[in-house]
Image (spheres, rainbow, N blue to C red):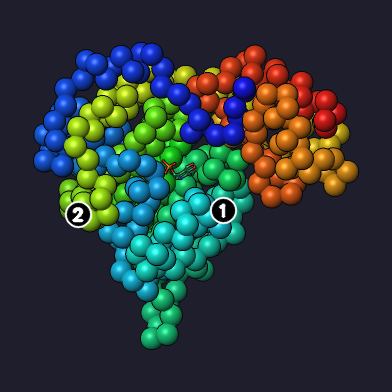
Amino acid sequence: MHDFYSDTKTKPTRGMLESVLAAEFGDEQKNEDPTTMELCRRVAEILGKEAAVFLPSGTMCNEIAIQVHTKPGDEVICERSCHLINFETGGPAAISGVMTFPIDGAFGIYEPDQLREAIRPPSRYAPESRLVAVEQTANMGGGTVWPLEKLNAVAEVAKEAGLATHMDGARLLNAAVKSGIDAKQFTAGYDSCWLDFSKGLGAPVGAVLAGSEGFTQQAWRVKQRIGGALRQSGVLAAMGLYALDHHVDRLADDHALAARIASHLSELAGVANVLPAETNIVIFDLKAEAPSAPDLEKQLLDDGIIIGAFGERRIRVVTHLDVDTASGDALCQSLTRYLG
Ligand SMILES: Cc1ncc(COP(=O)(O)O)c(C=O)c1O
């Protein structure tokens, strides 16, 4: 199968698995796992923050950060298509008792002026705006890279209003590789941010949430409360370290393959439009006369290809470590068959 559903589908490589055999382990909850501590140190350095905490998933990073930054009844301002609104089962409401205020951006990115308008003035009746969140890259926007100036301007508007800032960095290193800008420049205006190891970096499990010493201590308390404290997590962290050493630069290959697929799609008669494919995500819409997205998903499955249908007309294709040029060729051939 050629699996383009998500970059979460990668399997650990042999080198990655072998790195576990060479790693040292201890009790992570007691800060005794040297491999996990090293991964946290590396991520804090990459993101330009004082400290970091290892977590099982990116979703936990978002949800723990929200809990630390807010109190019940507060409001989190973010873009309408973002992960924390759409794919975390209402976690901000269920776990932290907060509301989300969705901004309608373009390709997952919003303007500083839109944020200015979204921030509520003090009132006896309204929820309090407390936290501003961004997603770098913007997944459902088509893997779009927030320009550095816009991220800084958004952070500045938030800070002027006394709000905290959070960056979902599930694919932050894709943005860094694509733009040539250091990850820590992107995160400079953000109080909390994180990297996911189970996306383009190709590890099976794990994410690291970073911030100030004080933020990280509070994040640790929430991690413990919701059962996220781990034991010999070096088994996982070793693969994260391996990914940092071996799988960052190669993200450029994923971007090149995505660009090639996007360019092919833009020439097919059944495709209404293709979102700008800046990194490893290609999102496109099907014309009314073309098969529906769920039907196309089924047709491609018969050809041994997995893609993602989002609604009736929208498809997402994601490139990653486990799909190569030959997979891309197979995908393009099948798409031509059904949409050409
Ligand atoms: C933008 C974004 N944020 C957060 C997540 C959640 O990450 P995880 O699957 O590690 O919980 C995802 C997962 O796909 C994502 O795409």
With respect to residue 31, does 189 lie above or below? below
Residue depicted at 52% across the width and 21% down the height: 322
Hey, which quadrant is residue 52 in on the image?
top left
Q: On the rendered image, what quadrant is the C terminus found in?
A: top right
Secondary element under disc 1, as helix, strand or loop, is loop
Q: Decide if residue 65 is on the left or right side of residue 323.
A: left
Disc 1 marks which amino acid? Answer: Ser
Where residue 252 appears, as percent x and y from the top left, is 51, 22
With respect to residue 6, does 101 lie above or below? below
Q: Which residue is mark 1?
A: 81
Depth order, front residue of 231/177: 231
Q: Decide if residue 318 is on the left or right side of residue 273.
A: left
Where residue 160 appears, as percent x and y from the top left, is 36, 63
Residue depicted at 68% across the width and 23% down the height: 304
Secondary element under disc 2, as helix, strand or loop, is helix
Residue depicted at 79% across the width and 44% down the height: 292
Which marked residue is nearer to the observer: mark 2 or mark 1? 2
Q: Which residue is mark 2?
A: 221
Hey, which quadrant is residue 248 in on the image?
top left
Ligand 1 falls in quadrant: top left
Where residue 235 appears, as percent x and y from the top left, is 26, 27
Depth order, front residue of 223/187: 223
Where residue 272 appears, as percent x and y from the top left, is 80, 42
